[in-house]
Amino acid sequence: MSSEVNQDSPSMRSLRCGEVRPLHVGQRITVCGWVGKRREHGEHLAFVDLRDYTGIVQCVVEGSVDVRSEYVLQIEGTVSARPSGTLNEQLATGEVELHDCVVTVLNAAEPPPFAVDDRVDVDEPVRLKHRYLDLRRPKMQKNLRLRAQVNRAIRGAMDAQDFCEIETPLLWAPTPEGSREFAVPSRLHQGKFYSLPQSPQLAKQLLMVGGFDRYYQIARCLRDEDLRADRQFEFSQLDLECSFVTEQEIRAFVTEAVLDAAEVATGVRPGPVETITWAEAIDQYGTDKPDLRFEMRLVDLSVEFAETEVKAFAAPTVKALRVPGGAEFSRSRLDQLVDRAKSLGAKGLAWFKVTQQEGVLGLESPLDRFLTDTERSALLQQTAATEGDLIVVVADEYRLTCSVLGTLRVDLGGSPVSEGPYRYVWVVDFPLFDGVDAEGRPEAAHHAFTMPHPEDLARLESDPLSVRAQSYDLVLNGWELGSGSIRIHRFDIQQRVFAAMGITAEEAELRFGFLLGAFKFGAPPHGGFAFGIDRLVAIFAGENNIREVIAFPKTQSGADLLTGAPSHLPASQMAELGIRPVPKAT
């Protein structure tokens, strides 16, 4: 920041409001902004707090000034030190103020529907209806400018790693990614539709065939899915694809980008990113999106309870979870845990408070008297429980047991995703297929173009559900940031995957012919990744809802309260597009 103000500048302002400092004392400056507050001191003196995105400066105006909150002003004045005892330590400009002010009203304003500051909570529908006012609030200014910083850091990281930024189409053909797509009717080809892309997946693979080697973009994507805290119809993602690389190299590219972004956003560069397999994540944390900010791992007791006579534990899988300090839970709290487990699909939940008498650990539970000494000892030793802890146990099929305890783990030990520290983890070796459809055909866990793990390729026809994929997710504080994979570049392997999924050659040609045709002309080995920028920025900003880092978001019902969208089209435009509304079935 320069200490000298150029008086001959053609600009409307010579400094921003929050830039005025003691080093400017004695200088004549011009600032522009909105009225935050106006305070009258008698008939001959007024204090006007003028605000722009950099902060607030106090202006002392002689005489009455007819301005109100959110008026847009230009004020010329002389920078002066505030009198002793009037300094405001809450403001960066709190040591100075403007005197001998000349006020120009650039635009008047009606009284706003809510105070444009962060000190008053405002209902979200009111904020979204008047989003242009909400955006003036310091929090929203901070969040969106943080987003710009993150985008810059990401672009810098990708440019430094020799990636080429290329834009891909928004009007595109349907993509095989499993989510519902938005359709756009064609005026020139009536009865036909474009799809808005869920991601640039197929386009970026074609870029690899085209020899671009390393591609990226901060892509706008659209999915017609139900909205929630971490999901909007429209979202932005870092999208990348590269050729002649290994999975480990792709993860390294992405790691560099997210760590650069974290350093810019927080001032601290996180440590190395851990890597675990999908199987380890499910087994130890009960989820493929593990939150590593706290320990509390699931412990398998299936072997120790294989011969149990306790009916509640007679199941293929028995797993336990130690809750530090949980012995203090009341009986009503424990009953709530049991009900929670049942709501998640478990038949029940066993609990054991860890006690100690004369230096010997014991268990307090309605089931304790049914346990053998070996089972009691296993519960204590395998969970490493100590006095004052609580042990909860679920027995059922493997995936259900893991899922229930994984959810309880987050319920009992977790914290909001936006709270630090920032713990990234790579989850690798996902299953290629995620169950079967109604006709018994394997369903792709991600999409049909993911390369099977080379060690499992021989089992693709005989045991498809056991085949691992060369796919990987990046997780931060229990939130999935994004996914990626090595792609299938060989036509013969692609045919085998299609066949395993029950996709005929004719169907494959109809749906993906343009991509499969390109693969016949020398497609290189390639892979890629994409992660959600909205989610990443929300975490850095300390927000648990991505609407707080998006300039113009939709409500949870998909409405835009500012513009009224979605709305009806005029009949003339509907006719031009060849569309006729059909009454909704009752």
Image (tube, helix red, strand yellow):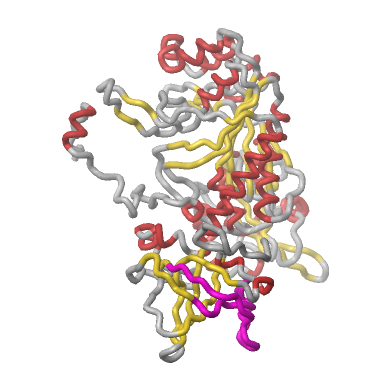
Give the side of residue 127 with respect to residue 101, left or right: left
Quadrant location of the N terminus in the rendered image: bottom right
Seen at 53% across and 56% down, the residue is 544
Q: Is residue 199 above or below residue 115?
A: above
Q: Quick check: is 251 in the magenta stretch? A: no
Q: Quick check: is 93 in the magenta stretch? A: yes
Residue 101 appearing in the image = yes
Q: Position of residue 491 (x, y in %)?
A: 57, 10
Q: Residue furthest bottom?
A: 42
Q: Which residues are magenta?
A: 73-101
* Residue 14 image-quadrant placement: bottom right
Q: Position of residue 4 (x, y in %)?
A: 66, 65
Q: Is residue 346 above or below residue 194?
A: below
* Residue 253 image-quadrant placement: top right
Give the side of residue 358 with respect to residue 369, left or right: right
Residue nearer the viewer, 500 or 392: 500
Residue 402 appearing in the image = no
Q: Residue furthest right?
A: 359
Q: Position of residue 123 (x, y in %)?
A: 39, 65
Quadrant location of the C terminus in the rendered image: top left
Residue nearer the viewer, 189 or 417: 189
Seen at 50% across and 16% down, the residue is 515
Residue nearer the viewer, 85 or 347: 85
Q: Residue furthest front?
A: 8
